[in-house]
Amino acid sequence: MPLPQETVGRMLMVGFAGFEPPPHILQWLAEGRVGGLILFARNVASPSQLAELTQACHEAAPYPILIAIDQEGGIVARLREGFTEAPGAMALGATGSEQLAEQVAGVLGAEMRAVGINWNFAPVLDLAHPSNIHNPSVGVRAYGDAPELVARLGAAQVRGFQSAGVAATAKHFPGKVQSPVDPHVDLPSVETPLEDMRTTDLVPYRAAIQAGLAAVMIAHVQFRALDPEHPSTLSHRVISGLLRQELGFGGVVVTDCMEMGAITRRYSSAQSALLAAQAGADVILISHTRERQEEAYRALVEAVNEGRLPAETVQAAVERVRTLAERYAVTEPPALDRVHTPEHRAITLRAARAGLVQLRAEDDVLPLRADDARAVALIEFASHLDSDVLESGGQSGLAALLGARLPRLQSVLLPSRAPDEEALARADTLAERADVLIVATRNAHLSPPQQELAARWLAQAQHGVLLCLRNPYDAGALEAGTVLCTLGDGAPSLQAAVDALLGEFQPSGKLPVAFG
Protein backbone atom coordinates (compact mmCIF):
# COMPACT_ATOMS: atom_id res chain seq x y z
CA MET A 1 0.00 0.00 0.00
CA PRO A 2 1.43 3.42 -0.94
CA LEU A 3 2.34 5.61 2.01
CA PRO A 4 1.17 9.20 2.38
CA GLN A 5 3.73 11.44 0.77
CA GLU A 6 4.23 13.39 3.99
CA THR A 7 5.38 10.16 5.65
CA VAL A 8 8.23 9.81 3.16
CA GLY A 9 8.97 13.52 3.45
CA ARG A 10 9.82 13.27 7.13
CA MET A 11 12.98 11.42 6.12
CA LEU A 12 14.34 14.51 4.38
CA MET A 13 16.27 17.37 5.99
CA VAL A 14 17.05 20.32 3.72
CA GLY A 15 18.85 23.64 3.78
CA PHE A 16 18.38 27.00 2.07
CA ALA A 17 20.14 30.34 1.71
CA GLY A 18 19.08 33.57 3.37
CA PHE A 19 17.98 35.04 6.66
CA GLU A 20 14.32 34.18 6.10
CA PRO A 21 12.78 30.86 5.09
CA PRO A 22 11.81 30.98 1.40
CA PRO A 23 8.14 30.43 0.54
CA HIS A 24 8.81 26.95 -0.84
CA ILE A 25 10.42 25.88 2.44
CA LEU A 26 7.39 27.01 4.44
CA GLN A 27 5.16 25.24 1.95
CA TRP A 28 7.17 22.02 2.20
CA LEU A 29 6.96 22.18 5.98
CA ALA A 30 3.20 22.75 5.88
CA GLU A 31 2.72 19.83 3.45
CA GLY A 32 5.05 17.48 5.32
CA ARG A 33 7.45 17.18 2.40
CA VAL A 34 10.42 17.63 4.75
CA GLY A 35 10.87 16.67 8.37
CA GLY A 36 13.54 19.17 9.28
CA LEU A 37 15.96 21.92 8.30
CA ILE A 38 19.72 22.36 8.43
CA LEU A 39 21.02 25.87 9.10
CA PHE A 40 24.41 27.37 8.31
CA ALA A 41 26.16 30.69 8.93
CA ARG A 42 24.44 31.93 5.75
CA ASN A 43 21.16 31.82 7.71
CA VAL A 44 22.40 33.71 10.77
CA ALA A 45 22.62 37.49 11.14
CA SER A 46 21.84 37.87 14.84
CA PRO A 47 20.18 35.96 17.68
CA SER A 48 16.89 37.84 17.25
CA GLN A 49 16.81 37.30 13.48
CA LEU A 50 17.57 33.60 13.90
CA ALA A 51 14.84 33.21 16.52
CA GLU A 52 12.33 34.73 14.09
CA LEU A 53 13.47 32.38 11.33
CA THR A 54 13.14 29.22 13.42
CA GLN A 55 9.84 30.34 14.93
CA ALA A 56 8.36 30.80 11.45
CA CYS A 57 9.49 27.31 10.50
CA HIS A 58 8.18 25.66 13.65
CA GLU A 59 4.83 27.40 13.20
CA ALA A 60 4.57 26.39 9.53
CA ALA A 61 4.74 22.66 10.28
CA PRO A 62 1.68 20.69 11.45
CA TYR A 63 3.85 18.61 13.81
CA PRO A 64 7.14 19.03 15.70
CA ILE A 65 10.11 19.38 13.38
CA LEU A 66 13.86 19.20 13.85
CA ILE A 67 16.04 22.23 13.13
CA ALA A 68 19.71 21.31 13.07
CA ILE A 69 23.04 23.12 12.94
CA ASP A 70 26.76 22.33 13.24
CA GLN A 71 27.70 24.00 16.53
CA GLU A 72 30.72 21.99 17.63
CA GLY A 73 32.58 24.90 19.16
CA GLY A 74 36.04 25.93 18.03
CA ILE A 75 36.62 26.13 14.29
CA VAL A 76 33.18 24.73 13.37
CA ALA A 77 30.56 27.04 14.83
CA ARG A 78 27.72 28.57 12.82
CA LEU A 79 26.59 30.78 15.72
CA ARG A 80 29.23 33.42 16.45
CA GLU A 81 28.27 37.11 16.39
CA GLY A 82 26.02 37.76 19.39
CA PHE A 83 26.42 34.21 20.71
CA THR A 84 28.89 32.70 23.16
CA GLU A 85 31.80 31.11 21.33
CA ALA A 86 33.45 28.06 22.87
CA PRO A 87 36.73 26.17 22.59
CA GLY A 88 36.55 23.15 20.33
CA ALA A 89 37.08 19.47 20.92
CA MET A 90 40.89 19.27 20.99
CA ALA A 91 41.14 22.17 23.44
CA LEU A 92 38.70 20.28 25.67
CA GLY A 93 40.81 17.18 25.15
CA ALA A 94 43.81 19.11 26.46
CA THR A 95 41.89 19.83 29.67
CA GLY A 96 41.05 16.14 30.15
CA SER A 97 37.99 17.34 32.07
CA GLU A 98 34.60 15.73 31.60
CA GLN A 99 33.10 18.46 33.77
CA LEU A 100 34.36 21.25 31.52
CA ALA A 101 33.33 19.36 28.38
CA GLU A 102 29.80 18.91 29.71
CA GLN A 103 29.56 22.53 30.87
CA VAL A 104 30.70 23.86 27.49
CA ALA A 105 28.15 21.69 25.71
CA GLY A 106 25.53 22.93 28.14
CA VAL A 107 26.33 26.54 27.20
CA LEU A 108 26.12 25.85 23.47
CA GLY A 109 22.97 23.79 23.90
CA ALA A 110 21.22 26.42 26.00
CA GLU A 111 21.88 29.11 23.41
CA MET A 112 20.75 26.93 20.51
CA ARG A 113 17.57 26.05 22.34
CA ALA A 114 16.99 29.73 23.18
CA VAL A 115 16.73 30.56 19.46
CA GLY A 116 14.63 27.55 18.45
CA ILE A 117 17.30 25.03 17.37
CA ASN A 118 16.76 21.55 18.78
CA TRP A 119 19.33 19.34 17.02
CA ASN A 120 23.10 19.75 17.05
CA PHE A 121 25.40 17.90 14.68
CA ALA A 122 28.01 17.40 17.43
CA PRO A 123 30.09 16.00 19.05
CA VAL A 124 32.79 14.78 16.69
CA LEU A 125 33.98 11.35 17.85
CA ASP A 126 36.64 10.84 15.19
CA LEU A 127 40.08 9.98 16.50
CA ALA A 128 43.07 12.14 15.61
CA HIS A 129 45.13 9.22 14.30
CA PRO A 130 48.82 10.04 14.86
CA SER A 131 49.70 8.23 11.63
CA ASN A 132 47.75 10.74 9.59
CA ILE A 133 48.29 14.28 10.82
CA HIS A 134 47.71 15.59 7.30
CA ASN A 135 44.00 14.78 7.21
CA PRO A 136 42.39 18.12 6.28
CA SER A 137 38.86 17.55 7.51
CA VAL A 138 39.16 16.91 11.25
CA GLY A 139 42.28 18.23 13.02
CA VAL A 140 41.31 20.15 16.16
CA ARG A 141 37.71 18.99 15.75
CA ALA A 142 38.86 15.74 17.42
CA TYR A 143 39.34 15.52 21.19
CA GLY A 144 42.58 13.59 20.73
CA ASP A 145 44.10 10.34 19.57
CA ALA A 146 43.28 8.12 22.58
CA PRO A 147 39.96 6.22 22.25
CA GLU A 148 39.31 6.35 26.00
CA LEU A 149 39.76 10.14 26.15
CA VAL A 150 37.48 10.68 23.16
CA ALA A 151 34.93 8.32 24.70
CA ARG A 152 34.91 10.14 28.07
CA LEU A 153 34.66 13.66 26.70
CA GLY A 154 32.29 12.74 23.88
CA ALA A 155 29.86 11.14 26.32
CA ALA A 156 30.14 14.20 28.57
CA GLN A 157 29.22 16.52 25.72
CA VAL A 158 26.29 14.30 24.75
CA ARG A 159 25.00 14.73 28.29
CA GLY A 160 25.59 18.48 28.16
CA PHE A 161 23.79 19.09 24.88
CA GLN A 162 20.84 16.87 25.69
CA SER A 163 20.39 18.20 29.22
CA ALA A 164 20.02 21.62 27.59
CA GLY A 165 17.19 20.38 25.37
CA VAL A 166 19.14 19.78 22.16
CA ALA A 167 19.58 16.38 20.53
CA ALA A 168 23.25 15.41 20.18
CA THR A 169 24.73 13.69 17.13
CA ALA A 170 27.91 11.62 17.23
CA LYS A 171 29.85 11.92 14.00
CA HIS A 172 31.28 10.74 11.64
CA PHE A 173 30.48 7.04 12.04
CA PRO A 174 32.38 4.77 11.90
CA GLY A 175 35.34 7.20 11.58
CA LYS A 176 36.85 9.46 8.93
CA VAL A 177 40.39 10.43 9.90
CA GLN A 178 42.42 7.59 8.48
CA SER A 179 42.42 8.88 4.91
CA PRO A 180 43.97 12.12 3.64
CA VAL A 181 41.03 12.57 1.24
CA ASP A 182 38.40 15.14 2.22
CA PRO A 183 34.85 13.75 1.63
CA HIS A 184 33.76 17.22 0.53
CA VAL A 185 35.93 16.61 -2.53
CA ASP A 186 35.98 12.85 -3.14
CA LEU A 187 35.36 9.48 -1.49
CA PRO A 188 37.97 8.37 1.05
CA SER A 189 38.65 4.64 1.08
CA VAL A 190 40.07 2.96 4.18
CA GLU A 191 41.52 -0.54 4.58
CA THR A 192 41.35 -0.72 8.38
CA PRO A 193 40.32 -4.19 9.62
CA LEU A 194 37.11 -4.31 11.66
CA GLU A 195 38.95 -5.87 14.60
CA ASP A 196 41.20 -2.81 14.79
CA MET A 197 38.20 -0.47 14.63
CA ARG A 198 36.53 -2.25 17.55
CA THR A 199 39.39 -1.20 19.83
CA THR A 200 39.87 2.29 18.35
CA ASP A 201 37.29 4.17 16.28
CA LEU A 202 34.22 2.42 17.69
CA VAL A 203 35.11 2.84 21.38
CA PRO A 204 33.77 6.42 21.64
CA TYR A 205 30.50 5.42 19.94
CA ARG A 206 29.84 2.70 22.49
CA ALA A 207 30.33 5.24 25.28
CA ALA A 208 28.09 7.83 23.64
CA ILE A 209 25.34 5.28 23.07
CA GLN A 210 25.52 4.27 26.72
CA ALA A 211 25.17 7.97 27.61
CA GLY A 212 21.80 8.10 25.84
CA LEU A 213 22.94 9.48 22.47
CA ALA A 214 20.04 10.72 20.33
CA ALA A 215 21.55 10.47 16.83
CA VAL A 216 24.51 9.30 14.77
CA MET A 217 25.78 10.87 11.54
CA ILE A 218 27.26 8.49 8.97
CA ALA A 219 30.52 9.38 7.21
CA HIS A 220 31.06 9.47 3.47
CA VAL A 221 33.96 7.03 3.87
CA GLN A 222 34.30 3.58 2.36
CA PHE A 223 35.59 1.00 4.83
CA ARG A 224 36.53 -1.82 2.53
CA ALA A 225 36.64 -4.41 5.30
CA LEU A 226 32.97 -3.67 5.97
CA ASP A 227 31.65 -2.94 2.49
CA PRO A 228 33.91 -3.04 -0.58
CA GLU A 229 31.17 -1.56 -2.77
CA HIS A 230 29.50 1.35 -0.98
CA PRO A 231 30.48 4.32 1.18
CA SER A 232 29.26 3.99 4.76
CA THR A 233 26.40 6.40 4.10
CA LEU A 234 24.89 3.96 1.60
CA SER A 235 25.94 0.72 3.28
CA HIS A 236 23.45 -1.67 4.85
CA ARG A 237 26.38 -3.49 6.46
CA VAL A 238 27.58 -0.34 8.20
CA ILE A 239 24.24 1.17 9.25
CA SER A 240 21.96 -1.79 9.84
CA GLY A 241 24.74 -4.26 10.63
CA LEU A 242 27.54 -2.57 12.55
CA LEU A 243 25.69 0.39 14.08
CA ARG A 244 22.24 -1.07 14.72
CA GLN A 245 22.97 -4.74 15.40
CA GLU A 246 26.50 -4.86 16.81
CA LEU A 247 26.52 -1.57 18.74
CA GLY A 248 22.81 -1.71 19.57
CA PHE A 249 21.99 1.86 18.56
CA GLY A 250 18.26 2.50 18.42
CA GLY A 251 18.20 6.26 17.79
CA VAL A 252 18.11 8.34 14.63
CA VAL A 253 20.67 7.80 11.87
CA VAL A 254 21.36 10.82 9.66
CA THR A 255 23.57 10.99 6.59
CA ASP A 256 26.26 13.57 6.16
CA CYS A 257 25.32 16.05 3.44
CA MET A 258 24.54 14.21 0.23
CA GLU A 259 25.90 17.08 -1.86
CA MET A 260 29.52 16.37 -0.95
CA GLY A 261 31.83 15.27 -3.72
CA ALA A 262 32.22 11.81 -2.18
CA ILE A 263 28.60 11.17 -3.20
CA THR A 264 27.85 13.45 -6.14
CA ARG A 265 30.86 12.26 -8.13
CA ARG A 266 29.35 8.76 -8.15
CA TYR A 267 25.58 8.99 -7.68
CA SER A 268 22.63 11.14 -8.66
CA SER A 269 20.52 12.62 -5.88
CA ALA A 270 17.81 10.06 -6.64
CA GLN A 271 20.25 7.15 -6.43
CA SER A 272 21.98 8.26 -3.25
CA ALA A 273 18.74 9.05 -1.40
CA LEU A 274 17.28 5.66 -2.23
CA LEU A 275 20.45 3.73 -1.38
CA ALA A 276 20.76 5.56 1.95
CA ALA A 277 17.16 4.78 2.86
CA GLN A 278 17.57 1.14 1.86
CA ALA A 279 20.74 0.95 3.95
CA GLY A 280 18.87 2.10 7.06
CA ALA A 281 19.34 5.87 7.23
CA ASP A 282 16.42 7.65 8.89
CA VAL A 283 17.24 11.20 7.78
CA ILE A 284 18.75 12.11 4.42
CA LEU A 285 20.52 15.45 4.53
CA ILE A 286 20.60 17.65 1.41
CA SER A 287 21.91 21.02 2.47
CA HIS A 288 21.93 23.34 -0.49
CA THR A 289 20.24 22.75 -3.84
CA ARG A 290 16.46 22.82 -4.28
CA GLU A 291 16.60 20.72 -7.44
CA ARG A 292 18.54 17.96 -5.67
CA GLN A 293 16.12 18.07 -2.75
CA GLU A 294 13.11 17.72 -5.05
CA GLU A 295 14.80 14.91 -6.99
CA ALA A 296 15.49 12.96 -3.80
CA TYR A 297 11.91 13.41 -2.56
CA ARG A 298 10.43 12.17 -5.84
CA ALA A 299 12.80 9.22 -5.91
CA LEU A 300 11.80 8.07 -2.43
CA VAL A 301 8.08 8.41 -3.12
CA GLU A 302 8.39 6.49 -6.40
CA ALA A 303 10.53 3.78 -4.79
CA VAL A 304 7.93 3.18 -2.07
CA ASN A 305 5.07 3.12 -4.57
CA GLU A 306 6.98 0.68 -6.79
CA GLY A 307 8.06 -1.59 -3.93
CA ARG A 308 11.79 -0.89 -4.23
CA LEU A 309 11.79 0.75 -0.80
CA PRO A 310 9.68 -1.26 1.66
CA ALA A 311 6.96 0.71 3.39
CA GLU A 312 7.98 -0.95 6.66
CA THR A 313 11.48 0.51 6.33
CA VAL A 314 10.11 4.01 5.84
CA GLN A 315 7.61 3.66 8.68
CA ALA A 316 10.32 2.52 11.09
CA ALA A 317 12.57 5.42 10.09
CA VAL A 318 9.78 7.96 10.38
CA GLU A 319 8.79 6.63 13.80
CA ARG A 320 12.33 7.20 15.05
CA VAL A 321 12.33 10.71 13.58
CA ARG A 322 8.91 11.47 15.08
CA THR A 323 10.02 10.26 18.50
CA LEU A 324 13.12 12.46 18.38
CA ALA A 325 11.19 15.52 17.19
CA GLU A 326 8.60 15.11 19.92
CA ARG A 327 11.22 14.55 22.61
CA TYR A 328 12.94 17.82 21.68
CA ALA A 329 9.86 19.71 20.43
CA VAL A 330 10.20 23.48 20.62
CA THR A 331 7.01 24.75 22.19
CA GLU A 332 8.36 27.68 24.20
CA PRO A 333 9.01 31.19 22.80
CA PRO A 334 12.55 32.38 22.11
CA ALA A 335 14.58 33.32 25.17
CA LEU A 336 17.22 35.78 23.99
CA ASP A 337 18.16 36.68 27.56
CA ARG A 338 19.84 33.25 27.75
CA VAL A 339 22.24 34.08 24.91
CA HIS A 340 25.79 35.42 25.41
CA THR A 341 25.41 35.75 29.16
CA PRO A 342 28.32 36.61 31.47
CA GLU A 343 28.01 33.17 33.04
CA HIS A 344 28.30 31.47 29.67
CA ARG A 345 31.32 33.53 28.67
CA ALA A 346 33.02 32.76 31.97
CA ILE A 347 32.57 29.01 31.45
CA THR A 348 33.97 29.02 27.92
CA LEU A 349 36.95 31.22 28.86
CA ARG A 350 37.74 28.95 31.80
CA ALA A 351 37.69 25.96 29.45
CA ALA A 352 39.85 27.74 26.86
CA ARG A 353 42.44 28.63 29.49
CA ALA A 354 42.49 25.06 30.81
CA GLY A 355 42.98 23.78 27.25
CA LEU A 356 45.89 26.05 26.35
CA VAL A 357 49.12 24.06 25.93
CA GLN A 358 52.63 25.42 26.42
CA LEU A 359 55.09 23.08 24.72
CA ARG A 360 58.26 25.15 25.24
CA ALA A 361 59.18 28.34 27.05
CA GLU A 362 62.40 30.28 26.52
CA ASP A 363 63.68 31.89 29.71
CA ASP A 364 62.79 35.54 30.33
CA VAL A 365 60.68 35.98 27.18
CA LEU A 366 57.24 35.80 28.76
CA PRO A 367 55.32 37.43 30.21
CA LEU A 368 54.88 40.45 27.98
CA ARG A 369 53.88 43.68 29.73
CA ALA A 370 52.09 46.88 28.80
CA ASP A 371 55.17 48.91 29.76
CA ASP A 372 57.56 46.47 28.08
CA ALA A 373 60.66 48.23 26.79
CA ARG A 374 61.14 45.47 24.23
CA ALA A 375 59.74 45.82 20.71
CA VAL A 376 56.98 43.23 20.36
CA ALA A 377 55.53 42.32 16.97
CA LEU A 378 52.84 39.93 15.72
CA ILE A 379 52.78 38.25 12.32
CA GLU A 380 49.52 36.35 11.93
CA PHE A 381 48.20 34.12 9.18
CA ALA A 382 44.51 34.81 8.73
CA SER A 383 41.53 32.50 9.08
CA HIS A 384 38.61 32.47 6.63
CA LEU A 385 36.73 34.61 9.16
CA ASP A 386 39.31 37.39 8.64
CA SER A 387 38.54 37.90 4.93
CA ASP A 388 36.78 41.24 5.49
CA VAL A 389 39.62 42.40 7.75
CA LEU A 390 42.19 41.56 5.09
CA GLU A 391 40.25 43.49 2.46
CA SER A 392 39.85 46.53 4.68
CA GLY A 393 43.38 46.48 6.07
CA GLY A 394 42.10 46.31 9.63
CA GLN A 395 43.13 44.30 12.66
CA SER A 396 42.32 40.67 13.34
CA GLY A 397 40.61 39.65 16.55
CA LEU A 398 43.91 38.44 18.00
CA ALA A 399 45.74 41.65 17.10
CA ALA A 400 42.95 43.76 18.60
CA LEU A 401 42.99 41.81 21.87
CA LEU A 402 46.77 41.85 22.16
CA GLY A 403 47.09 45.45 21.00
CA ALA A 404 44.65 46.59 23.66
CA ARG A 405 47.09 45.27 26.26
CA LEU A 406 50.34 46.18 24.49
CA PRO A 407 49.94 49.71 23.11
CA ARG A 408 53.26 49.57 21.23
CA LEU A 409 52.47 46.30 19.46
CA GLN A 410 53.06 46.24 15.73
CA SER A 411 51.25 43.62 13.69
CA VAL A 412 50.55 42.38 10.21
CA LEU A 413 47.82 39.99 9.05
CA LEU A 414 48.59 37.78 6.07
CA PRO A 415 46.37 35.49 4.02
CA SER A 416 47.21 31.85 4.68
CA ARG A 417 48.10 31.49 1.01
CA ALA A 418 49.83 33.87 -1.41
CA PRO A 419 50.37 37.07 0.59
CA ASP A 420 51.18 40.13 -1.52
CA GLU A 421 54.65 41.66 -1.73
CA GLU A 422 53.76 44.71 0.37
CA ALA A 423 52.52 42.56 3.26
CA LEU A 424 55.58 40.30 3.00
CA ALA A 425 57.90 43.29 3.12
CA ARG A 426 56.14 44.62 6.21
CA ALA A 427 56.42 41.20 7.88
CA ASP A 428 60.14 41.02 7.03
CA THR A 429 60.67 44.42 8.62
CA LEU A 430 58.81 43.43 11.78
CA ALA A 431 60.82 40.22 12.08
CA GLU A 432 64.12 42.08 11.72
CA ARG A 433 63.31 44.82 14.23
CA ALA A 434 61.36 42.95 16.90
CA ASP A 435 62.89 41.93 20.19
CA VAL A 436 60.03 39.46 20.63
CA LEU A 437 58.28 38.18 17.52
CA ILE A 438 55.01 36.27 17.80
CA VAL A 439 54.19 34.22 14.70
CA ALA A 440 50.58 32.97 14.78
CA THR A 441 50.02 30.10 12.36
CA ARG A 442 46.94 28.28 11.18
CA ASN A 443 47.74 24.79 9.90
CA ALA A 444 51.16 25.70 8.52
CA HIS A 445 52.00 21.98 8.43
CA LEU A 446 49.43 21.64 5.64
CA SER A 447 50.68 24.68 3.71
CA PRO A 448 54.30 24.64 2.51
CA PRO A 449 54.28 28.39 1.67
CA GLN A 450 52.97 29.33 5.13
CA GLN A 451 55.44 26.95 6.77
CA GLU A 452 58.37 28.36 4.81
CA LEU A 453 57.51 31.97 5.67
CA ALA A 454 56.89 31.24 9.34
CA ALA A 455 60.20 29.40 9.60
CA ARG A 456 62.02 32.30 7.96
CA TRP A 457 60.63 34.90 10.34
CA LEU A 458 61.12 32.81 13.46
CA ALA A 459 64.73 32.24 12.45
CA GLN A 460 65.27 36.00 12.02
CA ALA A 461 63.75 36.90 15.38
CA GLN A 462 65.85 37.59 18.47
CA HIS A 463 63.18 35.76 20.49
CA GLY A 464 60.50 33.83 18.65
CA VAL A 465 57.10 32.82 20.02
CA LEU A 466 55.17 30.33 17.90
CA LEU A 467 51.43 30.52 18.52
CA CYS A 468 49.65 27.57 16.89
CA LEU A 469 46.05 28.71 16.48
CA ARG A 470 44.77 25.57 14.76
CA ASN A 471 46.43 22.17 14.56
CA PRO A 472 49.26 21.66 17.06
CA TYR A 473 51.20 19.81 14.36
CA ASP A 474 52.66 23.18 13.33
CA ALA A 475 54.85 22.84 16.42
CA GLY A 476 56.46 19.76 14.91
CA ALA A 477 57.18 21.56 11.67
CA LEU A 478 58.59 24.83 13.04
CA GLU A 479 61.32 25.81 15.52
CA ALA A 480 60.80 28.46 18.19
CA GLY A 481 62.04 29.05 21.71
CA THR A 482 58.50 29.45 23.03
CA VAL A 483 55.53 27.49 21.68
CA LEU A 484 51.89 27.84 22.68
CA CYS A 485 48.98 25.88 21.20
CA THR A 486 45.42 27.19 21.55
CA LEU A 487 43.99 24.19 19.62
CA GLY A 488 41.41 26.42 17.97
CA ASP A 489 40.86 30.09 17.30
CA GLY A 490 37.42 30.92 18.61
CA ALA A 491 37.02 34.06 20.71
CA PRO A 492 37.73 32.47 24.12
CA SER A 493 40.80 30.67 22.79
CA LEU A 494 42.25 33.92 21.44
CA GLN A 495 41.53 35.61 24.76
CA ALA A 496 43.22 32.76 26.62
CA ALA A 497 46.29 33.10 24.39
CA VAL A 498 46.56 36.82 25.13
CA ASP A 499 46.12 36.19 28.86
CA ALA A 500 48.90 33.58 28.79
CA LEU A 501 51.26 35.83 26.84
CA LEU A 502 50.78 38.51 29.49
CA GLY A 503 51.35 36.08 32.33
CA GLU A 504 47.86 36.14 33.82
CA PHE A 505 47.93 32.36 34.19
CA GLN A 506 50.31 29.48 33.59
CA PRO A 507 49.06 27.14 30.83
CA SER A 508 48.34 23.65 32.14
CA GLY A 509 46.81 21.87 29.16
CA LYS A 510 48.29 18.55 28.04
CA LEU A 511 48.53 17.94 24.32
CA PRO A 512 46.06 15.11 23.56
CA VAL A 513 47.80 14.00 20.35
CA ALA A 514 51.24 12.67 19.50
CA PHE A 515 53.34 13.66 16.52
CA GLY A 516 56.91 13.30 15.40
Image (cartoon, helix red, strand yellow):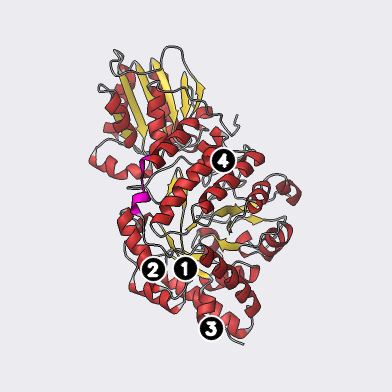
Q: CA distance from mark 2 to mark 1?
A: 8 Å
CA gap, disc 4 and disc 1: 30 Å
**Which image quarter is the C terminus in?**
top right
Residue underneath mark 4: 143
Q: Determine which residue is flagged by label 1.
A: 65
Rendered-image quadrant of the N terminus: bottom right
Marks 3, 2: nearer the viewer? 2
Mark 3: few/some/many CA within 10 Å (<14, 14-19, 20+): few
Magenta span of residues: 336-342
> CA–CA distance between discs 4 and 2?
34 Å
Q: Of tags 4 and 2, which is closer to the observer?
A: 2
Residue type at the position of mark 4 = Tyr
For disc 3, the marked residue is 4
Depicted 98 relative to depicted 241: above or below: above
Question: If you read the primary sequence from the N terminus, does the residue marked by circle 3 or circle 2 appear first?
Answer: 3
Instruction: Give the labeled residue for mark 2.
Output: 57
Name the amino acid, label 2: Cys
- In whole angstroms, how far apart are the C-alphas of marks 3 and 4? 43 Å
Residue 261: say if magenta.
Answer: no
